[in-house]
């Protein structure tokens, strides 16, 4: 950011970061369902 408060895009080439620049993603999903004769509810959180 400059001192004007607006965000700027910074692009760095992968070869400048070296071989250690790898991303790993992990996810966890929590799900719950409940139903009765009158109603049904389903909740998901990732």
Image (cartoon, rainbow, N blue to C red):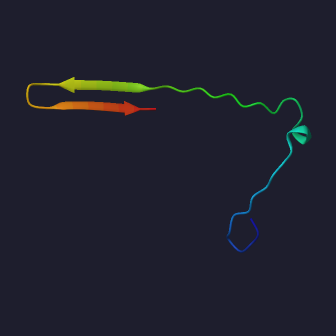
The quadrant where residue 27 appears: top right
Q: Residue at x 8, y 30 (%)?
A: 38
Q: Residue at x 77, y 30 (%)?
A: 22
Total tally of numbered discs in the picture: 0
Tell whether 27 sits left or right of 34.
right
* Residue 12, horizontal then vertical, whole percent: 84, 48
Location of residue 13 with respect to 37 vertically, above or below: below
The quadrant where residue 18 appears: top right
* Residue 33, horizontal then vertical, whole percent: 27, 25
Q: Residue furthest left?
A: 37
Q: Residue at x 31, y 25 (%)?
A: 32
Location of residue 34 with respect to 18 vertically, above or below: above
* Residue 40, horizontal then vertical, whole percent: 18, 30
Tell whether 35 sits left or right of 23.
left
Which residue is nearer to you in this view: 2 or 8?
8
Tell whether 7 sits left or right of 20.
left
Tell whether 33 sits left or right of 4.
left
* Residue 37, horizontal then vertical, whole percent: 8, 25
Quarter holding the N terminus is bottom right
Q: Residue at x 91, y 41 (%)?
A: 16
């Amino acid at each position: 950011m400059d001192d004007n408060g607006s965000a700027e895009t910074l692009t760095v080439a992968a070869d400048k970061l070296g071989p250690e620049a790898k991303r790993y993603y992990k996810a966890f999903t929590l799900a719950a369902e409940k139903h009765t004769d009158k109603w049904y509810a389903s909740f998901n959180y990732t």
